[in-house]
Image (cartoon, grey):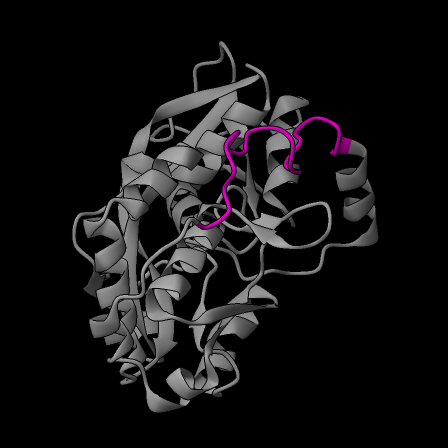
Amino acid sequence: MHPRRLIIPAAAAAAVLLLSGCVDNTTGGGEPTTDSSTPTIAVDEAAAALLPAEIADSGKLVVGTDAAYPPNEYKDADGNPIGWDVDLVEALGAKLGLEVEYEIASFDKIIPSITGGTMDLGMSSFTDNAERQQQVDFVDYYNAGILWAAPAGESVDPDDACGLKVAVQATTYEHTDELPAKNQACLDAGKPAIEITPFDTQEAAANAVVLGQADAMSADSPVTGYAIAQTDGKLEAAGEVFDSAPYGFPVEKGSKLADAVQAAMQSLIDDGTYADILAEWGVEAGGVDTIEINAGT
């Protein structure tokens, strides 16, 4: 459900800067209070033995991320990737005996970079679906749904949003699929259209709701939960989580890397590291017990 980033006009960018004081997504608020550095994790020799020879010989795992989707993956004040996805990938690297090397890229460049051989794995909250499986294989590690948020005390029904102005991060699944489908249903029923209002960042979308410039926002469930936590009671969940789908790490199609990552991630589940990381970030609701490959539809 994650976005393919786009460039916003200068006026919109200026507006985002003006709103930046409302929702603080930099480090210092909402992150784990404990030391989130990767603890000592023993290499899983069986998982490491599944690595493609070229990756094993290099000693590193090149991971592409756009680092723009808190709390999953985003940047700290120094521009370094942080988030629960990052903690998982660091633990994954440790299980495989590999150093993790991050490459920051726009979302829509990550899968082409994997198929082109310049990145080994993608880490940007990719929803595993049949269309993307034509290009890459996915190692599925988390279930995320859609969750709306609205100003505290306001009654908003995601299933009856006709006539509302809904903020969303540009080119997310919510922007390209969910809201257009809901809007078409409104039009077919002769009801007012949904005013779909995209922003370049999730922070800006949340700020629009806080400032009364939108009636609600729609995003992946862990992202909405994080936004609610950052607004000090100004936002609250509107309805329940719906349309759950797996997040997956994309890797080259047909590569043995998928098997190695699957085995290493399952090892992290079995030894409790996976659950500890999710709990530390407050996103354990979407945790899974079994790591699968290409389980999305």
Identify the residue shown where x is 39% and y is 56%. 91
What percent of the width, then of the height, locates residue 188?
A: 36, 42
Would you say 87 lies left or right of 256 here? right
Residue extending farthest to the top is 153
Q: Position of residue 22 (x, y in %)?
A: 70, 26
Q: Nearer the viewer, residue 184 or 49?
A: 49
Q: How many marks?
A: 0
Vertical arrangement, residue 125 with respect to residue 65, above or below: above
Q: Is residue 30 magenta?
A: yes
Q: Is residue 190 visible?
A: no
Is residue 84 part of the magenta span, yes or no? no
> Magenta stretch: dominant SS?
loop
231 to 17, vertically: above or below: above
Residue stretch rendered in magenta on the structure: 19-38
Q: Residue at x 27, y 54 (%)?
A: 268
Q: Which x, y percent locates residue 49?
A: 25, 80
Judging depth in this view, the residue of 189 and 34 nearest the camera is 34
Classify the position of the C terminus by image quarter.
bottom left
Of residue 195 and residue 281, the one placed in the foreground of this image is 281
Left or right placement of residue 72 versus residue 130 in this view? right
Residue 135 in view of the camera: yes
Residue at 46% x, 62% y: name it: 123
Query: In the image, is residue 78 above or below residue 295?
Result: above
Q: Name the residue located 31 percent from the left edge and 78 percent from the top edge.
A: 257
Left or right placement of residue 44 versus residue 39 in this view? left
